[in-house]
Amino acid sequence: MSIEVRQLQKKYGTQIAVNDLSFTIQKGEIVGFLGPNGAGKSTTMKMITGSIEPDSGSILVAGINMAENPIACKQKIGYLSELNPHYYDLYVKEYLQFVGAVHQCNNLTQLIKETIDRVGLGPEQHKKIGQLSKGYKQRVGLAAAIIHNPEVLILDEPTTGLDPNQIIEIRQLIQELGRDKTVLFSSHILPEVEAICSRIIIIHKGNLMANQPIAELNQKESLESVFRSMTGPIRV
């Protein structure tokens, strides 16, 4: 298993953000992680990446237990958070140099060049991050997430705020990355999930509501109808 979540629970005061959540993701899968705002998606992703600790339960990434060996576990993960924070005064290459050094990457100059080419940052690589469009900022975030060649990618709302052309480009990039990596990404946009995912996981109020292949779901009823019945209003 690339990702194994077992009976994960997280509370904030009396509010249960994630409730006894369990699922597994195989190597090479692209899995959509769905749920309305406040469902617990970002909290779950932050626990998988080791950004916050669960109250109970366990997380294994590439067979490594996050609680027992967090550094080795995090080395297997590339993470793009929903807010996608950057140092806007740094140039693109300068920022990737910093991120690569943090990961102790070898042959960093060549690695930066290859990563820039892979995510399509070539035309903007000599600019400061603050000068980039939203779409190119997302590409910088993806470049930072993959520069150390992780086995697992965790992407939290990677296409939020992008225009239609940028959304298509980022979707294509995620599909390309999914050829040799395990990808878990959250989204509210159902056509996006149906277009690139092999499987979906839906949570609501911290509880697992669905976990099944897209193809199997489409044989019975649409993803939209399932999601609407479980969680209420959606975006399409």
Image (cartoon, rainbow, N blue to C red):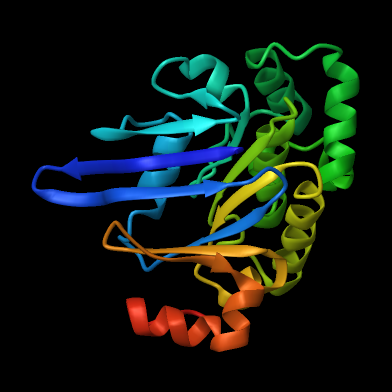
Q: Nearer the viewer, residue 132 or 164?
A: 164
Q: Could you tell whether 139 is left or right of 230 in the image?
A: right
Specify the farthest residue to the left. 14
Question: 154 above or below 67?
Answer: below
Residue 109 in percent (x, y) is at 87, 18
Question: 181 above or below 176?
Answer: above
In which quadrant is the N terminus drawn?
top right
Indicate the quadrant where residue 168 lies.
Answer: bottom right
Question: 102 above or below 1?
Answer: above
> What is the total number of numbered labels drawn onto the structure image?
0
Q: Nearer the viewer, residue 108 or 20?
A: 20
The residue sitting at 61% across, 21% down in the picture is 75
Q: Nearer the viewer, residue 49 or 84?
A: 49
Residue 178 in percent (x, y) is at 75, 50
Question: 156 above or below 59?
Answer: below
The residue sitting at 46% across, 87% down in the picture is 225
Q: Could you tell whether 127 is left or right of 114 in the image?
A: left
Residue 24 in percent (x, y) is at 52, 47
Q: Is residue 35 visible?
A: yes
In which quadrant is the C terminus drawn?
bottom right
The residue sitting at 71% across, 19% down in the picture is 100
Residue 172 in percent (x, y) is at 79, 60
Q: Is residue 121 visible?
A: no
Q: Could you tell whether 136 is left or right of 134 in the image?
A: right
